[in-house]
Amino acid sequence: MASNVPPGAPRQPPPPSYNPNYQQNPNTLSDNFQNLNLNRPSSIPNSGPRPSPFGQPPPFPSSAPSPQFSRPGAPPPGVVPRPSVPPSGLPPSTFPPNVTPGRPTGPPFSQPQPFSQTQPFSQTQPFGSRPPPGSFPSSASSGLATGPVSGAPPQGSLVPPLGSRPGPAAPSSSPLSMPPSSSFGGLMSNGPPAPAFQSAPRFPSPVSGPQQPPMGPPPTVGLARPPPQSMRQLMGSSGISGQPVASFSAPPQGTPFSAQHGMAPPPVGSPFAPQMQPQSVAQPPSIPGSAQPPRMFGMPPPLPNQMTAISPVMGQTGSPLSGASKIDPNQIPRPIPGSSVILHDTRVGNQANPPPPATSDYIVTDTGNCSPRYMRCTINQIPCTVDLLSTSGMPLALLVQPLALPHPSEDPVQVVDFGESGPVRCSRCKGYINPFMKFIDQGRQFICNLCGFTDETPRDYHCNLGPDGRRRDADERPELCRGTVEFVATKEYMVRDPMPAVYFFLIDVSMHAIQTGATAAACSSISQVIADLPEGPRTMVGIATFDSTIHFYNLKRALQQPLMLIVPDIHDVYTPLQTDVIVPVSECRQHLELLLDSIPTMFQNSRIAESAFSAAIKAAFLATKNTGGKLLVFQSVLPSVGIGALSAREAEGRSNISAGEKEAHKLLQPADKTLKEMAIEFAEYQVCVDVFITTQTYVDIASISVIPKTTGGQVYYYYPFSAVSDPAKLYNDLRWNVTRPQGFEAVMRVRCSQGIQVQEYHGNFCKRIPTDIDLAAIDCDKTIMVTLKHDDKLQDGSECAFQCALLYTTVYGQRRIRVTNLSLPCTNNLSNLFRLADLDSQFVCFLKQAASEIPSNPPLVIRDRVTNFCINILLSYRKFCATVSSSGQLILPEALKLLPLYTLALIKSTGLKLDGRIDDRSFWINYVSSVSTPLAIPLVHPRMIAIHDLDSQEAIGSLIPPALPLSSEYVNDNGVYLLENGLDVSIYIGNSVNPDILQKLFGISSVAEIPTQYVLEQYDNPLSKKLNDVMNEIRRQRCSFLRLKLCKKGDPSGMSFFSYLVEDKVPAGALSYVEFLVQVHRQIQVKMSS
């Protein structure tokens, strides 16, 4: 553990080949769980020891260790103080030989000194709590299995991924009549199957029952069918029969951080345990419409004519029920939970291996193509012509997350240093050397896989070819055998010296912010996070506060205390000092702590309600302009004075909506161009802005969010802000913001091989030239969507290559080029496109496009576009690929069978609510613009679990019990239910819950005592402990602390809870899931007959 270091002591920089994303030792999971300090009492000003910034050395000599990052997580009960001396028994961290194991253990205990005699500081108590590290994000499995009805009970373990909902669907609230042509077709599977995954299995799989492949017409009983060689056993048998397709498991995705300190170690078989082994688990109850028969390893994949057909409910004679009929709720597709980790090789036999779903849990071996965490395509075979793509109705796009966190069991990205000559590149298109460039003429020349140009191999890079035509050293060079590598950039990639890591904190001290506790929460969080900033003399900090004026602080060490400098001009702002406003953190640690403790007291009697937000960030930008850096702004009220002042447009919006005004959506657009113009200037000087909105009122996020979106930043939204429950989340969010893998002054470009070109980039960035995007900062959570278009015909059987190059500066001042490569086969076969469609990527692609269009179109227009997107894809499949001719069936391609459910969930989401708050919708739009795929799915399709019987549920491989369908049919008055969407957690308490359960879980005796503001505590009983374990695990999976809210029936909170149940019919007119399937089916029939 870190030894004691006096404040201000210098720290050594990282090794020259430091890799910011390196994770080598899976045992660091447990090592990192020492870093907890939650719900801190005012008497303990410090927190637990922090993790070492470096890990163990990697296997490649060219790469280097990287820090062990800790993620936000859940607070444990009680207090875990951060002592100045590490407690005994903690595992020591491993440092490279050139790194001093020194890390401060917290702010000093010195008593603050007054600023002056007339304005004394008072000692403020620590505010908020200190949550533990969390984990890599995770979300839903996209269960790819459907089959005919079978009475077999599920087998194996069933672990709910995010958004998975095993269970029967709620019947339609009213009988729905099917078209007259409806006839019995049963549930049939004869369309394209899901892709086979070909990496070798490392875990045995139990065999259940005799296995035989289905033959002839669709059977009437379930037949077990083996999965492809690399698949885990499917956890659960089918409530539906037919030719099953292997489903993907989705426990939480891997994380470099382990569970809570003091918690039991990960269960054997957990993806977070140091070694994964098979496990025996209890069999969950059978839930119709959710699972499928298991298959054995080593058996061939399903026949290529596989799909899902949904038919009307039948009478006993086998004919449609007389009168009105409806779709059988037991047949509707739902996500299928699983508990196994998928082992995925990116290429097998020199062929691209289709990736597992983004929402499943998988471990990647990079064998030429990049990990799908970094880049994945919406279709895993590229259509040869634009006509074929248009016919399919599917989008062609890449989802690029270049700094994504790897699973802890995966190899790190290797760092390659070519010296002064720099990496080898194509002289025509400037593409970087990669595994798909072909060497010829005994290695003296190479052919670019992107543009086809033949180049001379540099003399010092020459190597002879082997009998297979590959270079003999290909497997020893990461750039020739790995899909993702990181090159050390030379001087030619720099227009100036790499910038230092600069963090400037800007705090709202207006009357509202002081009175709600937002200022105190911000100061407390910053004070605790200072010690988490990157090590080294290049890390610099600055602080300013603002209300109707701007207050800078001179943090020079020579001064006895910080000196306040006021900028009264908020229309023509300036920086009062060119130096000493931003100083190395090692020189001002004591001044910072003194200042942050004192700010809430200094302004406690302020009666200034106005906020000069825009002027303040402009002044802070001027202070950081010479270096660039991160500007972290804490804002509580509507910016009302100075440049960029805004008005309360929400009141206008409410009256417009009530009057039937069609232009109400324009309130989701920025009020004017002032902030956009400022943001472009910020991005030009490499200043990234993150805004933490701690408010109880309307603040016009539509206008404010322009700045983070343009500068590569992020909006954090705490509404309504609670001084009781929100400081812990604020601290967690801030800490992860500054400690996650990230880079500064970045430029990104995606190159495609001939025949395909980039159409548009979508995300949080600034774009000055057509081919590149500029990112003042980029981090592991940011995703860029890249839409593609044809500019020529591709050759069937050839491969189409994509290369993403990200030039950036690490937090330690090293210039790097991260290169990510993906090569996919081209096809003229429409069935192949549907068979290899990536559901999660396609849906997230359209989710991002829909979100970007919401501010310029009424919600009903966007809803129609979303529905038509779904219908057109299913129509194309039905028209050109389906082999079943009965018009009474809704035919779904197996890989996209959940598309109608996700589409319905999007229609009912926050961004498209007609009666939603303007700020809530604006935040949702901004969040979607850069969200990763594993977190986008739960945003629209949350996870719901029952928690009133946690102590009686058997462990099935996960702390989290199986998810329930998002239908009120599964919410009983005598139960307690938890629902989470990756941002918030709602706990619904029924009116008839046993008082003993209420006492055990929440310490209350009746529903009437439910508090409006709540902080989860752990009581001395098994049920409470399990609930805390579940919350901690969810927070760890989502890499977010997640706000918690209690809900009850007949209350606005209860209505909010039920609004997430997307399978229900909504009074405002949105259909139930069954009704939506009927609507989709009818529209397909109409288009088929026209």
Image: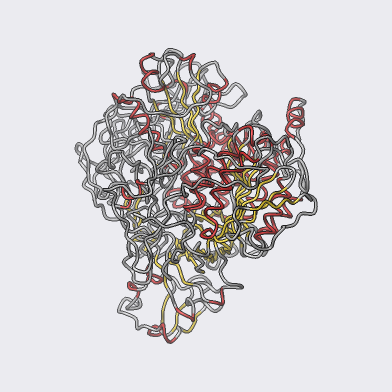
Residue 578 quadrant: bottom right
Residue at the limit of the structure toward the bottom, as seen here: 459
Q: Note whether residue 89 is visible.
A: yes
Asked if residue 1030 lies left or right of residue 1078, the reply is left
- The quarter of the picture where the N terminus appears is bottom left
Q: Which is more toward the observer, 101 or 365?
A: 101
Q: Position of residue 1026 (x, y in %)?
A: 33, 29
Q: Which is more toward the observer, 800 or 601?
A: 601
Identify whether 7 is placed above or below 498.
Answer: above
Question: Residue at 60% across / 42% down in the picture?
Answer: 121
- The quarter of the picture where the C terminus appears is top right
Residue 464 quadrant: bottom left
Question: Residue at 35% across / 76% down in the picture?
Answer: 470
Identify whether 469 is placed above or below 846.
Answer: below
Asked if residue 97 lies left or right of residue 784, the reply is left
Q: Note whether residue 764 is visible.
A: no
Q: Position of residue 328 (x, y in %)?
A: 43, 25
Q: Position of residue 106 (x, y in %)?
A: 44, 49
Q: Position of residue 68 (x, y in %)?
A: 39, 55
Q: Which is more toward the observer, 819 or 187?
A: 819
Asked if residue 349 lies left or right of residue 307, the reply is left
Number of callouts: 0
Question: Residue at 39% across / 51% down in the picture?
Answer: 50
The type of colouring in the image is secondary structure
Residue at the limit of the structure toward the front, as seen here: 117
